Amino acid sequence: MNWSLVTIRQGPTTSLAVRREHGSLLAPTELKRWSSMLELLDDWDTARPTLQTLDIESAPTAVADEILTPISWPRKIVCAGVNYRKHIREMGGEVPGDSWVPFFFLKPPTTTLIGPTDPIVIRNTETSRYDWEAELAVVIGRGGRDIAVGDALAHVAGYCVSNDVTARGHHRRAKDDVPADAFPYDWFGSKAVDGSLPLGPGITPDFLVPDPQDLRLRLWVNDELQQDESTADMICTVSELISAASRITTLEPGDVIPTGTPSGVGAGRGLFLRAGDVVRTSIDGLGEITNPVIEA
Ligand code: MG
């Protein structure tokens, strides 16, 4: 039985708990030594063996009003740019060769991260054209810089389901607003929007995920399946992404790395999110997040 570490709210109090795959919540006493997920992740070398020996079966039941976003707040959210073969093709491109080096962009942690059931708030729907991007998100446990590909998975604390909501309409700047060919894109306008990273339901520890390149991602809008792909379609593996990101920035405990989205985004078919939609994103073994879309 898989489980994940969640942050729950009961009244005014937040605490850590275990969420079993089918949804029940437990409060093993061992988790009380950390007051927050970030504190646990900062103490990962102690936390990991503690989690590995948790006696889930005999843990007391936890009661929660709400499951919150797992980490409040990571120091960085480093998102991989295009990283799935079929997604490149649907966006009109060619799959790159072996020399491909991944690229990244940032999302502001405190304002983009929302919980597994929080609403996605959209503004100016017609011009912003909000799109969905189901993604496997990696959470760093042990920080580092210039991490070798072969060592990268040892830096992972666990994995989450995420949706890299994108204001597609703001990604490419209007021709008249591009003063030189070097400035065609607005990554901030399209990716840094408030509430644009639903994450959860919890962090499934690395030792419960035998192969991050063998996970099935799916995303539904109003129960209509839009994305359905295995992480095996990634161009750069989780290990390669961690290594590449760590050559640019020092990775720290709690950093979140969404690893790119597979094919099936709305952009390729002229679809985008509207108020009243419900977006459900799942990764087999990690769980599911469900976010209604509302207009600001
Ligand atoms: Mg993305």
Image: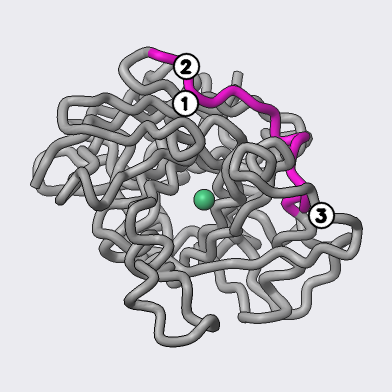
Q: Amino acid at mark 3?
A: Pro
Mark 2 vs mark 3: which is more N-terminal?
3
- For the point 52% across and 20% down, the residue is 57
The reply to whether dot 1 and dot 2 touch (C-beta < 8 Å) is yes
Label 2 element class: strand
Q: Which residue is mark 1?
A: 219
Residue 94 screen position, x and y as percent = 76, 48
Label 3 element class: loop
Label 1 element class: strand
- Report whether 275 appears left or right of 256: left
Q: Which residue is mark 2?
A: 225
Residues shaded magenta: 224-238
Mark 1 vs mark 3: which is more N-terminal?
3
Q: What label sits on residue 35 in the rendered view?
A: none
Quick check: 25 above or below 136? Answer: above
- Within 10 Å of disc 1 (Cα), the crowding (few <14, some 14-19, many 20+) is many
- Within 10 Å of disc 3 (Cα), the crowding (few <14, some 14-19, many 20+) is few
- For the point 54% across and 30% down, the residue is 264
The reply to whether dot 1 and dot 3 touch (C-beta < 8 Å) is no
Q: Is residue 29 visible?
A: no
Q: Amino acid at mark 2?
A: Leu
Residue 259 screen position, x and y as percent = 61, 51
| Camera-nearest residue between 109 and 278 | 278
Distance from the alpha carbon under mark 2 to that under mark 3: 28 Å
Q: Verify whether residue 21 appears in magenta.
A: no
Q: Which residue is mark 3?
A: 96
Q: Nearer the viewer, mark 2 or mark 3?
A: 3
Q: Is residue 150 visible?
A: yes
- Report whether 167 appears left or right of 45: left
| Camera-nearest residue between 29 and 154 | 154
Question: What colouring does the structure picture have?
Answer: one colour
